[in-house]
Each structure stands twice: as structure tokens, then as C-alpha cells.
Image (cartoon, rainbow, N blue to C red):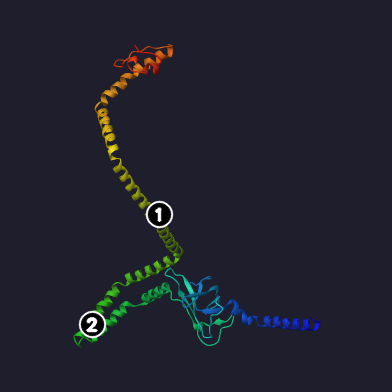
């Protein structure tokens, strides 16, 4: 290959590399996703690492939640290179679970494509619905309600319409009673709302504890399911062993029954002569003690035992004992 051809090839490769480097910002989102930003009025509990979802599917993660002067800037990364996010796309902070986990939900819309590092303005973002804040607002509004003036106004309307049809005064009388009930229960209602807000705050503070309890309960159920097969196998083995023992007892009933009968007879005799056996043992103690002392001081001993036949009356006994008895 000539030097001119090598020069042409090298120049072409260099041009391709330069073109690729210049257009890298345009094609990088297609290869590795893109980083976007969304402006919210409030974060609503969204934190770094929370998922970014589109139609229920996780497509990325929240990278940063930054507080600005009057709003919150949420930076996130979309990992799906083929996901088209139009120029009119929206964003919202929504609850991911009953324990308060949040997620950034994207709503792709509009023509074109949002470029890398683009911003979704505040007009196209939806802040989260916070139950604690709603209860706080209801409590504040109830506290500012003038129940006395409300009761007076309803009384005035009732007096004005007193001469109308019978149904209207009855309805207004019901409204008057309702107003009186609200007025009488104002303190209790306010206390109930305050306790509701406190309960919501306590649940939010113990979010990690509740999550740990649910996870441990799931682990316990999984362990019980794993042990179920072992327990069933143990019960099957015990049943088979009981059947084998029952069959063995039936097969050896003829041999075991006489032996058990004789053993029962022996136990009956020992039970009936328990006092005699106990007395014999107590009386044998001094004799055995004396016999031990005699044996320890004499080289030999001749003894006579009543009701025991001589050795020559039993064949082989004399050879076993080594000498006869008197």
C-alpha cells in the first residue's frame, strides 16, 4: 500500500473521529440515557435515590433534590435510551406504597424530544398530596370558623322562613340542630383533628420501623413455607414407624405374650413380698459387715448356708467352687 493511500485512510479516520466527538452530545442520550430536571413547588418527601417511573415502570433514579428560593429543583437520570420524552412532558411526585415511599412519575407528551439537561417548568409539574398538610389545613379552617355567628345566621334564616311551607321550617330546624351540635362539639372535633395529625406524624416518623416489621413478617412466612415440607416428611416417617412397630408387635405376639405374663407374675411376687425382701436386706447388713471383717483377718473360711445342698449333690458344682461345703 502506497503512502498516498495510507494518508487518505488516515485522514478519513481522523475526520470520522472529529465528527463523532463533535456530535457526542447529540448521540450520548441515545446510548446512555439522559439527565433532566423538574421544578416543583415542594419536594413532598422525594429524596435522592427514589425511582423515576413511566406508566408504572422504573426508568431511572432521582439524583438530587435541591431547595431554591421559592421552589425545588429535582434532578434525575433516565436510563432507558429508547424512551421518547416529548417537549410537553409532565412530572409529578406520587406515593409508591402505603408506607409513604415516593416516586417521580413522568408523563411523556408533545412533539420532539427533550435534550439532555433540559428542564420541565413549574407549570407542568404536580406537587404531591400530603395527608398531614390536608389535616393541618382542615384544622386551621375549623379553628377560624365562628360557630356562634353561624348559629345566629341559621336562626335568622329559620325565623325569616317560618311562614313558608311546613317542610322548609322542619329542614331549617334540622340545620339549626346540626349547627348547635357542631357548636357544642367544636372542641371535640378540633381535638380529633389534632390527634389525627399527630397520628399521621407518628406513622411518618416510624416509617422505617413499620417497613422492618413487614419485612421480618415476610421472612417468617418464607421460613414457615420452607419448613412445611420438612414437617410433612417428619409426620410421614413417624406414621410409617408406628405402622412398622404395630406390625412387629402383631408378628411377635405369640413369643412376647408368655414372657410378659411371666414378668408380670415375678413383679406380683416381688410386690407381695416387698416387706420380707426389705427386712432381709436390713438384717443382712450386720452379717455382711462381720463376714467382711472375718475375711480380712483369716486366710480361709468355712461357712454353712441353710437350705443349700452340698456341692457333691450338684454335678460339676464342686469343681466350680474348688472345695466342698459343710
| Residue 309 placement, left or right of 168 | right
Q: Residue at x 38, y 75 (%)?
A: 138
Front position among marks 1 and 2: 1
Which one is in front, 49 or 280?
280
Mark closer to the chain start, 1 or 2: 2
Q: Secondary structure at mark 1?
A: helix
Which part of the image, by quadrant, shows the N terminus?
A: bottom right
- Give above or below for 302 relative to 15: above
Q: Which residue is mark 1?
A: 230
Which one is in front, 303 or 24?
303
Q: Position of residue 36 (x, y in %)?
A: 56, 79
- Residue 163 placement: quadrant: bottom left
Q: Which residue is mark 2?
A: 171
Q: Position of residue 183 (x, y in %)?
A: 30, 74
Which part of the image, by quadrant, shows the C terminus?
A: top left
Whole-number angstrom distance, CA of label 1 to CA of label 2 = 69 Å
Q: Few, some or many C-alpha atoms within 10 Å of disc 2 (few <14, some 14-19, many ≥20)?
A: few
Amino acid at each position: 500500500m502506497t503512502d498516498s493511500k495510507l494518508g487518505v485512510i488516515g485522514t478519513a479516520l481522523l475526520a470520522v473521529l472529529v465528527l463523532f466527538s463533535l456530535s457526542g452530545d447529540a448521540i450520548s442520550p441515545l446510548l446512555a440515557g439522559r439527565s433532566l430536571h423538574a421544578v416543583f413547588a415542594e419536594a413532598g418527601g422525594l429524596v435522592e435515590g427514589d425511582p423515576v417511573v413511566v406508566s408504572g415502570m422504573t426508568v431511572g433514579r432521582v439524583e438530587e433534590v435541591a431547595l431554591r428560593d421559592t421552589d425545588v429543583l429535582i434532578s434525575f437520570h433516565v436510563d432507558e435510551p429508547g424512551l421518547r420524552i416529548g417537549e410537553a412532558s409532565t412530572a409529578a411526585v406520587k406515593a409508591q406504597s402505603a408506607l409513604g415511599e415516593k416516586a417521580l412519575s413522568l408523563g411523556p407528551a408533545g412533539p420532539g424530544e427533550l435534550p439532555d439537561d433540559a428542564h420541565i417548568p413549574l407549570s407542568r409539574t404536580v406537587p404531591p398530596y400530603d395527608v398531614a398538610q390536608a389535616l393541618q389545613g382542615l384544622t386551621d379552617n375549623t379553628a377560624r370558623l365562628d360557630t356562634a355567628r353561624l348559629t345566629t345566621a341559621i336562626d335568622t334564616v329559620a325565623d325569616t322562613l317560618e311562614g313558608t311551607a311546613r317542610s322548609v321550617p322542619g329542614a331549617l330546624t334540622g340545620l339549626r340542630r346540626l349547627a348547635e351540635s357542631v357548636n357544642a362539639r367544636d372542641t371535640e372535633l378540633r381535638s380529633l383533628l389534632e390527634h389525627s395529625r399527630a397520628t399521621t406524624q407518628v406513622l411518618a416518623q416510624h416509617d422505617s420501623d413499620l417497613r422492618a416489621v413487614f419485612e421480618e413478617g415476610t421472612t417468617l412466612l418464607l421460613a414457615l413455607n420452607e419448613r412445611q415440607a420438612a414437617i410433612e416428611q417428619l409426620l410421614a416417617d413417624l406414621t410409617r414407624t408406628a405402622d412398622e412397630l404395630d406390625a412387629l408387635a402383631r408378628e411377635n405376639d405369640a413369643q412376647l405374650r408368655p414372657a410378659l405374663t411371666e414378668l408380670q407374675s415375678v413383679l406380683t411376687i416381688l410386690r407381695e413380698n416387698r416387706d420380707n425382701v426389705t427386712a432381709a436386706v436390713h438384717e443382712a447388713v450386720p452379717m455382711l459387715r462381720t463376714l467382711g471383717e472375718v475375711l480380712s483377718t483369716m486366710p480361709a473360711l468355712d461357712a454353712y448356708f441353710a437350705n443349700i445342698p452340698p456341692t457333691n449333690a450338684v454335678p460339676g458344682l464342686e469343681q466350680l467352687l474348688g472345695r466342698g461345703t459343710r
